[in-house]
Amino acid sequence: MIITDNEFVDLPTPYGPMRTHIFRPKAAGKYPGIVFYSEIFQVTGPIRRMASQIAGQGYIVAVPEVYHEFEPAGTVLAYDQAGSDRGNALKTTKELASFDADAKAALDYLASRPDCTGRLGAMGICLGGHLAYRAAMDPRVRGTVCFYATDIHKGSLAKGMNDDSLARTGDIKGELMMVWGRQDPHISLEGRMTVLNRLNEAGVTFNWHEVNGAHAFLRDEGPRYDPQLAHALLGLAYTFFHRRLGMGDDE
């Protein structure tokens, strides 16, 4: 499916405007919407390419700049030590309420678009996996895919490093697809089991996938990229979204 990938909107939030990049099918029609959350580096080349892939499956994809109140619109952090340090510092500087307000703004925007069917999903990678998990607490979200979501098991997201994601897991009413790399040093086996046990305890409907991959195995840049795993797991994600959100009615 041919897409358009050069649009953006600045969505109002209580913490300032949030630059949000839009990827969508070019054909006229109505399509489900997906909020796609980036890693700590914001909307990098690999994130844009992945958003394009998702849109090409028949979705309107909104990619927010997660650090919009700290960085000028359009800022992309480099995949180096300085970029990593900055991204990790902002992850625990930003207010938890701001992360949640961002999710509401992005979901509200997608739901309001005349070319959206109103069926909404979320997806995220690394930090974005955790943000997608929290977005799933909105009852409008029918399906959510989280790739190696960091910090859920520790409750260490946002200012104060004391988030309530595990406590609020029961608020998730849609279905989850959780994907983990067994060689990921950021989420240990114990950490993964903490999340798994909480999902079962809360009665959430979910799919659980553990693969032999490192952190960032999905990113098509850098030494940890695993093309075979990325292809297989993204295929599962697209099938999941087709089942949970349906298809568009392109003309």
Image (spheres, rainbow, N blue to C red):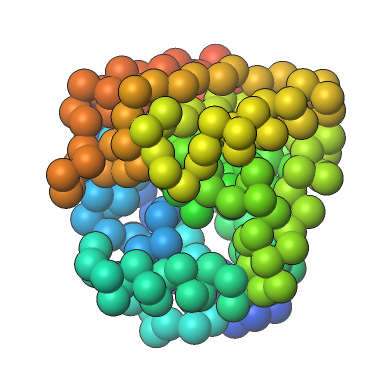
> Which residue is found at the position 48% from the left and 28% from the top?
179
Q: Residue 212, how many percent across, how many down?
A: 34, 23
> Which residue is found at the position 39% from the left and 21% from the top?
211
Q: Is residue 188 above or below residue 72?
A: above
Q: Residue 48, how many percent across, how many down?
A: 28, 51
Question: Is 60 left, or right, of 134 in this rendering?
Answer: left
Q: Is residue 28 above or below residue 12?
A: above
> Which residue is found at the position 72% from the left and 19% from the top?
205
Rendering quarter of residue 72: bottom left
Q: Is residue 230 above or below residue 63?
A: above
Question: Is 192 left, or right, of 63 in this rendering?
Answer: right
Visible residue check, residue 208: yes
The N terminus sits in image quarter: top left
Visible residue check, residue 58: no
Q: Is residue 6 above or below residue 218?
A: below
Q: Residue 245, how many percent across, how many down?
A: 57, 25
Q: Residue 8, how many percent across, how many down?
A: 39, 64
The C terminus sits in image quarter: top left
Q: How many marks?
A: 0
- Which residue is more in the foreground, 133 or 114? 133
Question: Is 155 left, or right, of 59 in this rendering?
Answer: right
> Which residue is found at the position 63% from the left and 61% from the top?
157
